[in-house]
Amino acid sequence: MNDSPGTLAESLYRQAQQLVPELRKRQPSAIKLQRLPNVTLSDLQAGGFFRILQPKRFGGYELDPEVFFRVQMILAQGCMSTAWVLGVVAIHNWQLALFHEQAQRDVWAEDNSTLISSSYMPVGNVTRVDGGFRLSGHWGFSSGSMHCQWAFLGAAIPPEDEGDSPDYRTFLVPREDYDIEENWDVSGLEGTGSHDIVVRDAFVPEYRTHRSIDGFHCNSPGNQVNTAPLYRIPFGQIFVRAVSSAAIGSLKGITGDYIAVNRHRVGLNDGNKIATDPEAQVALAQALAVVDECETIMFRNIRRMMAVATANSALPLEERIRMRYEAARVGARCADAVNDLFIACGAQGIHRSHPLNRAWLDINAGRTHVANNPFKFARNLGGSLMGQANTDSFL
């Protein structure tokens, strides 16, 4: 596309909004399949949504992260599983831009629409060999894995010298080197198809790895060829929003259903209108406030990160710690809000056909992601403000 960034962004928003009604209709199919329907993947590809953060050198748009997360939140109003898969898979196109240029060519040279799934948990077993590493392991929760031809897998390389810290890296592995164990049987976010990945002694060249410390310092091999400010944002800051922002969109979308359900509903036991129930009124007001708060803080932080990157400066550690905590709060805030809406709908909400049931399951499922547990990030923020050492490297 040759459109200006602003025109392209508006086009992406319109396309995403047009998909929302169809995504709602496809939710039962996604649940039954335990993955996204192929037509949904085709729609996401045709809409160019995976290209938003992808380098222009490989057919991407290199747009501001704000555009990407707005698209993700719009899609979540139709189906949170769809938005979740887009979030984590498209973020991999951003991270691949940080890898050595040859790794980018390996994935995109023949087909720049090729997708990558992931599981960053550091459970891989690594052995150093000539030219790279031998990798084995069993990773869980690889969202969208059935739709992808490569995988990012996490592992810590044992230190070469005694006393040194392990070297945490992301390993890029092609589909022929791993098996997908289809075991995704869950309540909530069923359509993400977050199956397990199994690798049995695969060779991974050195250039197909990305060091976490390079992502932390915003000085990765790929920065030599992908020089846009977009790729100088800390990896820890951009990834965590891919697994939190879909909850904002889902909560926003469900408020309209909540109003439609309860505007004229009368309680079966007392005959009172739900619209006059103070708890039902407050639940709606608070949900809308949570959406506004989470959106406002996220985009404020993204704009700050982009401004710092554009100035070729470094984001201070204290800001990164605060932003990390604010991203982690999103899942909890949205889960609390949807739980209040769900309870205000009475016992009818437990029926799978109820408009709020799906959002209630999905938002609470997303809340369980390790990046969406605010407790340890709150401790780190509070402790650092009182002079304690930072305990988080994924910032």
Image (spheres, rainbow, N blue to C red):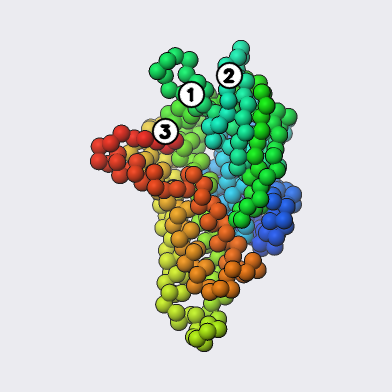
**Front-most of residues 300 and 364:** 364
Query: Mark 1 or mark 3, which is nearer the start of the sequence?
Result: 1
Q: Quadrant of the N terminus?
A: top right
Q: Quadrant of the C terminus?
A: top left
Q: Residue at x 48, y 80 (%)?
A: 275
- The kind of residue tagged 1 is Asp
**Front-most of residues 250 and 366:** 366
Give left or right: position of 331 versus 148: left
Q: Is residue 128 above or below residue 345?
A: above
Q: Residues within 10 Å of mark 2 (few under 14, many from 20)?
A: some
Q: Residues within 10 Å of mark 1 (few under 14, many from 20)?
A: some
Q: In the structure shown, which secondary structural element does the residue marked by tag 1 occupy?
A: strand
Q: CA distance from mark 2 to mark 3?
A: 23 Å
Residue 19 visible in the displayed image? yes
Quadrant in which residue 312 is drawn: top left
**Front: mark 2 or 3:** 2
Q: In the structure shown, which secondary structural element does the residue marked by tag 3 occupy?
A: loop
- Residue under circle 1? 167
- Residue under circle 3? 393
- Residue under circle 2? 127
Q: Residues within 10 Å of mark 3 (few under 14, many from 20)?
A: few
**Front: mark 2 or 1:** 2
Give the residue furthest to the bottom.
Answer: 271
Q: In the structure shown, which secondary structural element does the residue marked by tag 2 occupy?
A: strand
